[in-house]
Image (cartoon, helix red, strand yellow):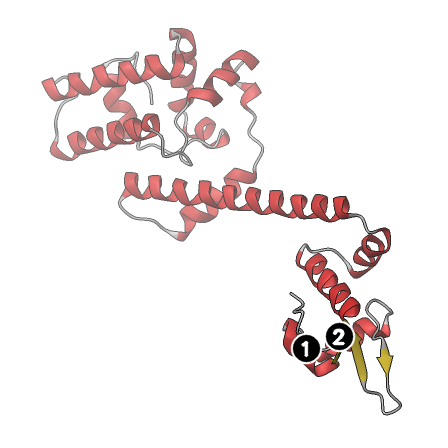
Amino acid sequence: MISKEQPAYLSTGELSKLLNVSVRTIRYYDQIGLVEPSKKEAGGKRFYSKENILNLQKILLLKSLNLSLEDSRQILSEQSMAAVLLAHKTILKEEIERLQASLKHTQSLLNILDLQDSLHWEDLIALVAGAEKEKEWSRYFSKEQQTTLKSHLPKLESDDASTKKWINLIKRIELCLEKGISPHSPEGLLISEDAELLSDETFGSPELEEAFWEIRKSSEASEELGLYPINPGVIGFLESASKKETI
């Protein structure tokens, strides 16, 4: 900000220190007629008035919004504050979208780590590539079914309770597989019941549940739709316990 006690004119060097901008930049703005000094001495020394300094501050503000110098020149000539605010809003929205995408990727990796107990670069590369790839859900489901699935399916990028329930269910089944516990054992039957409850919450209809189950049994179709690759043993465990349950 410009201080009331500030001298009427500042040299290029003084202005550089005040606004933390290079002398080279100030001279360049002078050369292109963007911010010209009010006084120029015979020896080449330049002095900037408070109005000049304010104009330079405006240019630096617009530059921080990623506006070009020509756009900045036009905005300054029009004195359009609305244009400045709209440009700033656009930059903020782009930054929010970038951060949201980064947050989703990070949560996905945390969920993968929870499921796998280890993480590799291949997982990250596949995750980012998969997020950018168009999924052809229409090949397998109606528009109404797609709406239901996209609203209720657990998502790797989510940290909600539903996603956590599915992750825990998968891990419980993997523990049964490690210990050789049968899907028809009391523990296996309890897991089967939990899977049925989760399936009812997720799909809402036996027809949609069965259709999704068929997709889940195909590693190729699951990959095509960007679904997390589940150990075939986990699928077999649930299928053996009850063919109604899916993941």
Q: Residues within 10 Å of mark 2 (few under 14, many from 20)?
A: some
Q: Quadrant of the C terminus?
A: top left
Residue 98: where, in percent of width, then height? 55, 46
Q: Distance of mark 1 from mark 2, alpha carbons?
A: 7 Å
Give the residue drawn at x 32%, y 28%: 161
Task: Identify which amino acid the numbered label 2 is placed on.
Answer: Ile
Residue depicted at x 42% and y 36% = 157
Residue type at numbered disc 1: Ser
Farthest residue, direction front:
5
Badge 1: how crowded within 10 Å, few (<14), some, or many (20+)?
some
Q: Quadrant of the N terminus?
A: bottom right
Residue 16's label in the rendered image is 1
The residue that disc 2 covers is 26
Q: Which mark is residue 136?
A: none
Q: Secondary structure at mark 2?
A: helix
Residue lying farthest to the bottom in this orientation:
43
Viewed as shown, does residue 29 lie left or right of 166?
right
- Specify the quadrant of the image occupied by residue 227: top left
